[in-house]
Amino acid sequence: MATYVLLSRIEPEVTGDADSFRRIADTVKQTIRKECPGVTWKDSYVTFGRFDVVDIFEAPDETTAQRVAMIIRRHGHTKTETMLAIPWKEFLANL
């Protein structure tokens, strides 16, 4: 499986109500579990910079990674960027 880094910018109106935001986060999580069964979630981080959230997950292929990004965009009211993450040792071995 490949590792992906998904960077999200959350729309400001979504963060106004904490309970609503938690429900949206739960909906996103449940939808990904249902629609992308091959995905393994590694971790998520909140940042205070250009992006609001950094998610790291493994997916069996690019199509599944794209599906994850679209679910987050659709339900999470975010703009996203998704990148393939190659482990450093693997990168060096392939030089």
Image: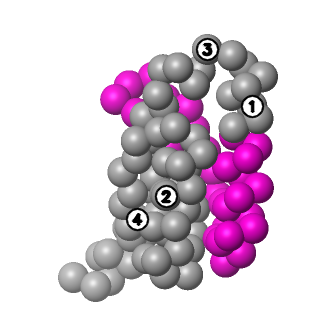
Question: What's under tag 3, amino acid-wise?
Answer: Gly
**Residue bearing mark 1:** 22
- Which is nearer the N-term, disc 2 or disc 1? 1
- Quarter of the rendering containing residue 26: top right
Q: Which residue is mark 2?
A: 70
How far across and down, in percent of the image, does residue 58 sit? 57, 69
From what the image shows, is residue 1 above or below residue 47?
below
Any magenta on residue 72? no
Q: Position of residue 70 (x, y in %)?
A: 49, 58
Mark 1 lies on a secondary structure that is: helix
Vertical order, 73 against 62 (above or below): above
- Say which element carries label 2: helix
Of circles 3 and 4, which is in front?
3
Q: Earlier in the sequence, mark 3 or mark 2?
A: 3
Name, please, the residue furthest toward the left: 95
Q: Which residue is mark 4?
A: 85
Q: Magenta span covers which residues?
A: 25-54
How crowded pointer 2 is (Cα within 10 Å; few <14, some 14-19, many 20+) is rated as some
Q: Please give the residue where the numbered disc 3 appears in the rendered image.
A: 16
